[in-house]
Structure formats: C-alpha cells, structure tokens
Image: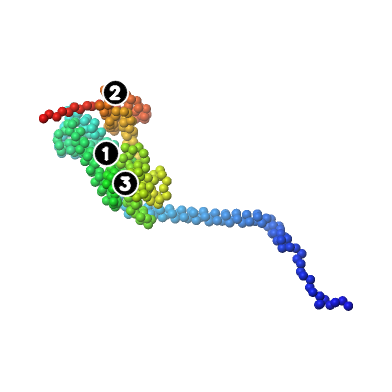
Amino acid sequence: MRPSRAGMSPRPWRPTVTPEERIAQLEQQIKDLAGLSPAEARDQVLRQAEAELQDTLIRQRDHARAEAQDQARHLVLTAMERLAGSVPAPVTTSVVPLPNPDLKAKLVGREGRNIRAFAQTTGVDMIIDQGLESVTLACFDPVRREVARLTLLNLIVDGRIHPQRIQELHAEAQATLSTSLKEAGEEAARRAGVTGLPAPVIEALGQLRVRTSYGQNVLDHSVEVARLARLLAEELQLDPEPAATAGLLHDIGKGFASENPRSHAHDGMKFLQQHGLDPQVCEAVGAHHREIPSELPLTALLIAADAISAGRPGARREPTALFQDRLEELEKVAKGFRGVDHAFAIQAGRELRVMVRAEDMSDEDTARLATQIARALKQKREPNAPPLTLTVVRERIFQESIH
C-alpha cells in the first residue's frame, strides 16, 4: 500500500538562481532597455544635475551682482546727496592789490633790479600791468607763490623795497606761512569732525593747503573724502570715526612728497605709524592706491570715497597738472647737478633760473655747469617745446656793520 500524500513532509524551496545572479540579470535587462551601463547612467544623471545646478548658480550670481550694484549705487548717491561740497577752480596766479599806483615804479626798481631780485629770491614771476592797480604773481608751485604773496604784502606795508629787504621779508614770510598752515590743518580737522590728532600730524595736514593734484586742492579734497568716508561707513553700519580719520589723512604723504620720491601713500602710512595712529587707519592710507595688499573693509571704503571725490566732473583738470609736471621736470634736471642751491622755472617755463652756492663754485665752474645743464635739458627736450633760456647765477654778498 502506498503512503498517503498528506503524511509526507514538503520539500524545501530552492531558488533556481542566486540573488547575485538575479541582480545581474536585472541590471542586464535595464542595460538592454536603456542602452546604458549603470556607470554610464550614473555619469549621465550627474552631468544633468551639474548642468542644472550650473544654470541655477549663474542666475543666482547675476542676481546677486545686480542687487549689489543697486545697493552700491544707492550708497554712493545717498552719500553724495548728504554731502554739499564745492569744486574750487585751480589757479596758478595770485593777485595782490596796490594801495598806491606809485608803488609800481618802486617794485620794478632802477633798471629793473627789484623785480629781478624778487623773482630770483622767491622763484615767482611778478607781472606789473600799467593799466591795473594790482600786481600778479605767477608760479606753478603753490607754496612758492604763497610765500611770494606774503613777501610782497610785507614789502608794500614796509615801504623799503630793495634786494636786501626782499630777502629779509622772504625769510619772514616763510616762517609766517608755517604758522598759517598749522592753523589750516586744525581747521580741516574741525571741518572733517576728526579729533585727537597729534600736533605733527596736524602740521603735516596743513601743508596740503598749498598743494594741488590735477588742479584739485589736496586739503579740500582730503576733507571731502573724510566726510564721504564717514557717510559711507554710516550707511554700511561700520565705525565712522576711523573712516573719517583715514579719509582726512589719506593724502598726507603729498605734503612732503618733494623731499621723498617714494609713493605718497607709502610715505603717509609710515608717517602715521611713527606718530601712533590706529593701525587700521595706517594700513588703509598705505593701500588706498592698491600698492600694498589689504583686506580691511576700511581700505575698500577709503578707495571708494577717494574715487568719488576725484572723479566728480570739474574736480580735476589734467592739462594743468601736465604743464606743472613739465616745469617740475625742468627744475629737477638742474637740481641734479653738484653745487646747485635752487632752481626756478619761471616765465611759464620759458626760463630756468639756477642759483649756485658761491662758496662751492668758481666763475669757471659756473660756466661749465651752465653748459652741462643745457646739454641735459636738450636731451630731455620735447620736439615742439618753446624756446628755453637758462640763467645760472653765482652771487656773493658782502655785508659790514658800521657803528
């Protein structure tokens, strides 16, 4: 008798393929349907995702740039609207009124000796027009022109007009100007709302009153940059005090640029460091022409304020500055020779007057020096430059006191 099926135990189920084989089969089916391997499909998905993200990033970047430009434009316009500034016209002459027309003859002197002595001592041309009741002083260097103006005013008051008195009053005028420039520095700091500056810094700041850059008065420009920097800092929620200080002092190196040929930004930074100013202010001053690296927000703010002030229509006049550079180059060539004491480019650059130290040079040495300077000037001369007269002066003065 055969045993019943109900009493038999069921056989265990055994898969015909292993899981690994089944996965391989499914992958092969997917590959056949898609025409891609898993690796190729993964790469394709990644490329598509990367392309979509790239488009998104480009749109976000463009939107951020546009928004940043709008905000920057708003900041600049807001600062400019809040700042009421003037644009002084650049001048290379000073006019001194004469209380008495008879003074013209005394200023000229016998055979023109007084007017020649004035030009030789001050380095400034005195222009006397018989039809005007005033005298015009012409010079590209504002420092020399201001000293000459003070000298002439003192001569008019004193009444004794002769070469020796011109030299004496010229020395007094130089001392008077030094005091006047210190007061100008104090007034500039007050206008900019900057306090606590050391006395040497105030004095150096005052020197900028008689300096120009492309026809723009440097002290007025510095005050304007200080006020702009303060307004921009307030809009950006930064500390406005360091911003105003950096703006006021950013061009302080121009006050002694003639003595030191290095960059005025570098010179200004070193000068401020020597007098213990805020390190961030010093760094911003040194980097405001991007000559040294700086990541400070204050530096970027100072660069922006400086550009706004300098870039306003009418703020600067390049032709005047180029003319001034040519005259300074003439003087620089002459001063490069041994024995030269002073060199003045006068008559709008048509004459270069050179004074030598009499104790160091004989008459023969002076004659040779004139030839050497003329040769050097000829080498640097521009093709269409106007005629130039070179005058080399060796003068000895003997003075005795009689009691």
* Residue 385 location (% of width, % of height): 34, 30
Residue 396 lies in quadrant: top left
Query: Hey, what amino acid is under mark 1?
Result: Val
Query: Which mark, by number, is residue 143?
Result: 1
Of callouts 2 and 1, which one flags the residue occurring earlier in the amino acid sequence?
1
Q: For mark 2, does the 10 Å Cα neighbourhood hold few (<14), some (14 to 19), or many (20 or more) residues?
A: few
Q: For mark 3, does the 10 Å Cα neighbourhood hold few (<14), some (14 to 19), or many (20 or more) residues?
A: few
Q: Residue at x 37, y 57 (%)?
A: 237
Residue at the disc numbered 2:
365
Foreground tag (3 vs 2): 3
Extreme-top residue of the structure = 364
The CA distance from mark 3 to mark 2 is 44 Å
Query: Which mark, by number, is residue 339?
Result: none
* Residue 378 location (% of width, % of height): 35, 27
Residue at the disc numbered 3:
275
Q: Residue at x 79, y 74 (%)?
A: 9
Q: Quadrant of the N terminus?
A: bottom right
Given residues 305 and 71, the one toward you in this image is 305
Q: Which element is circle 3 on? A: loop
* Residue 256 location (% of width, % of height): 31, 40
Q: Residue at x 32, y 27 (%)?
A: 373
